[in-house]
Amino acid sequence: MPRINLLPWREELRDQRRNQFYAVMAGAIAAAGLVVFIGVLVMNTIIGHQTGRNDVLKEEMKLLDMRIAEIKSLESKKDRLVERMQIIEQLQQSRPEVVHLFAEMVTAVPDGVYLTEIKQSGTSLSIDGAAESNTRVSALMRNVDKSGWLMAPDLKIVEVMKGSDRSQGSLGSRFSIRARQITAAEPGEDAS
C-alpha cells in the first residue's frame, strides 16, 4: 500500500524556514550591532587621539604666543636702544661743532658788539646783543656770512636805545640776528 504522509509538512517547512530566517536575521542584527559597536569604539579612539593632539597643539601655540610676545618686547627694546645709539652718535658727531661754533663766534664778533644771548634750536641760531652803532651790526653780519660754520644771517631787529636804555655805557642799538649753523654732515660745504 502506498504510504500517505498526512503530516502537515508544508507547515513544518514554513516554520523551519521562518526559524531559519529569524536566526539569520538575529545573526545579521547581532553582526551589525557588533560592527557598529566596533566602529563607535574605533571612532571614539580616533577622536580621543585627535583631541589629545589638539590639546598638545594648543599648549604649544600658547608657548609660541608667549615667545612671540617676548620677541616683540625684545624688538621694541632693541628699537629704543637703536634710537638711543643714534642720538648718542649724533651728539658725538656734533660735539666738535659746538667748539667750532664758539670759536667762530669769537672771530665773527667785531669790537663794539656785545652778545647778550645765543640760542640754538637744531641748526638755527638766534643771536641777540647790543652794539655801539649799526655799522658794527653790519660788520657782524658780514663776518657771520664769511664764516665757515655759519651761513644765511638774517637781521630780525635793530632798535636804537633811548637815553634811559643806555645804562650799559655807550651802546647805541640792540639787535637780533638769525643764522644757520653748517654741520659737518652737510655736503658741498667746506667747514674748516
Image (cartoon, rainbow, N blue to C red):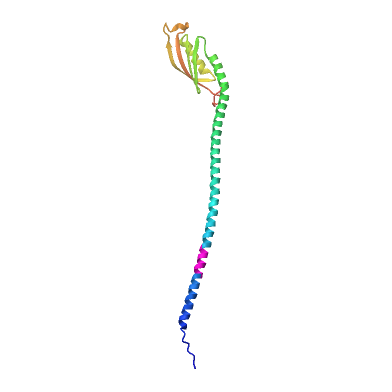
Residue 138 lies, with reference to residue 26, above or below; the image says above
Screen quadrant of the C terminus: top right
Nearer to the camera, 31 or 127:
31
Give the quarter of the image for residue 162: top left
Q: Residue at x 46, y 82 (%)?
A: 10
Which residues, given as a range, are shown in magenta? 27-36
Q: Looking at the image, which residue is at 50% across and 65% down?
A: 33
Main secondary structure along the magenta-highlighted residues: helix
x and y percentages locating residue 21 in the rendered image: 48, 74
- Foreground of the two, 173 or 47: 47
Q: Quadrant of residue 49?
A: bottom right
Q: Position of residue 34 (x, y in %)?
A: 52, 65
Near-viewer residue (92 or 36) = 36
Q: Position of residue 16 (x, y in %)?
A: 49, 78
The residue most toward the bottom is 1
In the displayed structure, does residue 177 sit left or right of residue 90?
left
| 99 within the magenta span | no
Question: Which residue: 53% across, 50% down?
Answer: 54
- With respect to residue 24, does 129 lie above or below? above
Q: Is residue 28 magenta?
A: yes
Q: 97 above or below 171?
A: below
